[in-house]
Amino acid sequence: MRLMVSIALLPLLAVTATAQQRPAAPAVYRIHKLFLESTDLSRPLRQTIVQAFQGGTYNLDELAERVRFKLRDSGYALAEVKPAQVSRPRHAQHACDADVTFAIHTGNRYRLDGITFTVDPGQPVFTAAQLRSQFHIEDGAVFNATEIGKGLENLKDLYGSDGYPNFGAIPKPIYDNSRHAIRLAVDIDQGFPVTFGKLFMEGIEPRAGAAQQLLASWKELEGKRFNSRLLREWLKNNSAEQVNNQNVASVDPRVLNVLVHFR
């Protein structure tokens, strides 16, 4: 059984769409040689970046962003990557082969100076220590953008596992250029706790009795406090393979209904 599942707390909204001309797809290149021009990029980091992307296939905006993230994960939070210069290799094997050059200015290398949290509304659900433990990067360590992103995802899972699917977080980096340090201030909107609501289904059953089987298994969750981990387990047990952000009508915003699409 293959299912697509969507969850929502708000009523359906009517949307009017207008036809628009699609923009041209960005040019995609297979990177024959990657060159990084810089006066302040260390040789080991230069080699790491080249080895990561040389030989791969990317559009240039995507490649520039990937290079920038590699730099940010090495502490260069304000690194600049200039637009690419592209040339055709002399002995190209494919039409999309290209030599790509980026001019880079790494700037200062920053370390993490701590993470603070401002929580709203109401009484914090978790302590500051519990929130900080979701970020697996120590104070004083080289700033790493990927680890910060993982920490924010961990916060989402932490709140979701306690019934708060409306959780939101906005990270604000505060730079101390004299000390080359970054303090991360995270504003948290806890949202409100919700419970599992009804299960709705759309489409044609892949086999007779599939709908009744899903309804029966859903009864174990219906009425209980929402838990994102329980929902993931239910999806796994019922072979749900994709989650979309579509809306299901819900009279009570504190009840989370789930819509299953058979396909």
Image (cartoon, helix red, strand yellow):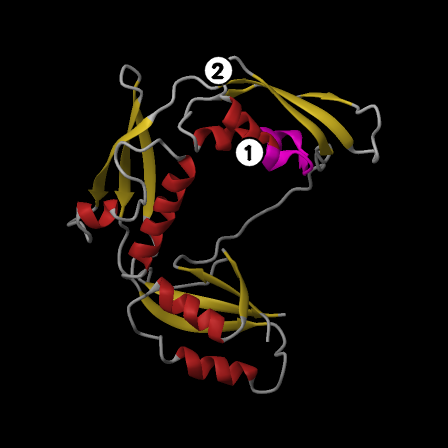
Toward the top, the furthest residue is 39
Taking the magenta stretch, the answer to whether it contains residue 24 is no
- Quickly name the residue at label 1: 66
Q: Which mark is residue 40?
A: 2
Farthest-out residue, left: 123
Vertical placement of residue 203 versus 186, above or below: below
Tag 1, which secondary structure? helix
Q: Using the rendered view, name the quadrant where residue 111 is placed.
A: top left
Secondary structure mainly formed by the magenta segment: helix
Q: Is 110 drawn above or below residue 186 in the view shown?
A: above
Q: Is residue 83 visible?
A: no
Question: Residue flagged by tag 2: what amino acid is it?
Answer: Asp
Q: Residues within 10 Å of mark 1 (few under 14, many from 20)?
A: some
Assign the C terminus to one quadrant of the image. Answer: bottom right
Image side of residue 106 versus residue 101, left or right: left
Instruction: Identify the image quadrant of the N terminus.
Output: bottom right
Q: CA distance from mark 2 to mark 1?
A: 19 Å
The residue range painted magenta reads 51-66
